[in-house]
Amino acid sequence: QTRQRVFFLGLPKGSRWEPPAPTHGPMTRRPYRTVRDAIADLPALASGESTSKYLRGSAKGYAAQMRGRQRTLLNHRAPKHPATTLARIEKTLPGEPLYESFKQRIRLHWDKPSPTQVSGGIRSQFQFAHPEQIRGLTIRERCRIQSFPDWIWVAGGLVQGRVQTGNAVPPLLAEALAQTVLDSL
């Protein structure tokens, strides 16, 4: 996801610390990961549907890394939307806002990184619509965008899952940051 973050680190006096080098993007030889990289291998769902079965042989690259050896698909339940919301999603082009007044609520674009994922508070509204399917994202899709491997199960309902994934630091980012701290010690 495209997100700027600020971290405050406490290190022993005299320590030298270098921030992690970019792994993807214009300063590297690897393009940014896209929404397609993260979620295209997950089974299609309609509003309100769920599944715990993966599509066979569908995971490649980043998706395969996130899936690992996981056999059961966790937290892949689509939010149930009213007909008016489904109609709004259907008429919105990928990469465009769903609402004139709420520009941060968009239909994701397959070939771009996701915008910043936020927690959304305690209301049941969704932030992002799927780039192709007529629905909001599942918690598993939100986890994939944040780099949580598929063996991580998010407890609680859909709203609580949005809060947890939106407030989280992506594990791959945390790992890169932690490695630089270890290197400095």
Image (spheres, helix red, strand yellow):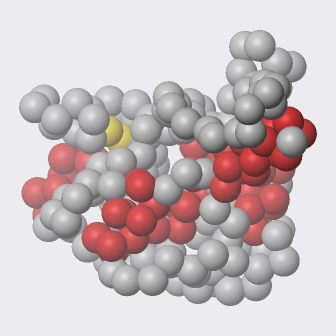
Where in the figure is residue 145, as x and y percent of width and height? 57, 51
3 up-or-down from 131: above or below = above
Residue reaching furthest top?
27
Along the viewing direction, whichever of 185 and 174 lies nearer the viewer: 185
Residue reaching furthest front?
13
For the N terminus, the quadrant is: top right
Q: Can residue 86 be seen in this view?
A: yes
Q: Quadrant of residue 153?
A: bottom right
Query: Which residue occupies 72% across, 13% down?
Result: 26
Q: Is residue 109 visible?
A: no
68 up-or-down from 110: above or below = below
Query: Which residue occupies 16% across, 63% down?
Result: 123
Along the viewing direction, whichever of 90 and 27 lies nearer the viewer: 27
Query: Which residue occupies 13% across, 29% down?
Result: 100
Query: Which residue occupies 19% across, 65% down?
Result: 122
41 up-or-down from 30: above or below = below
Left or right, residue 24 beside residue 7: right
Q: In which quarter of the image is residue 59?
A: bottom right
Total numbered circles: 0
Left or right, residue 33 beside residue 128: right
Along the viewing direction, whichever of 116 and 63 lies nearer the viewer: 116
Left or right, residue 158 beside residue 108: left
Where in the figure is residue 91, as x and y percent of width and height? 24, 40
49 up-or-down from 148: above or below = below
Where in the figure is residue 31, as x and y percent of width and height? 75, 25
For the C terminus, the quadrant is: top right
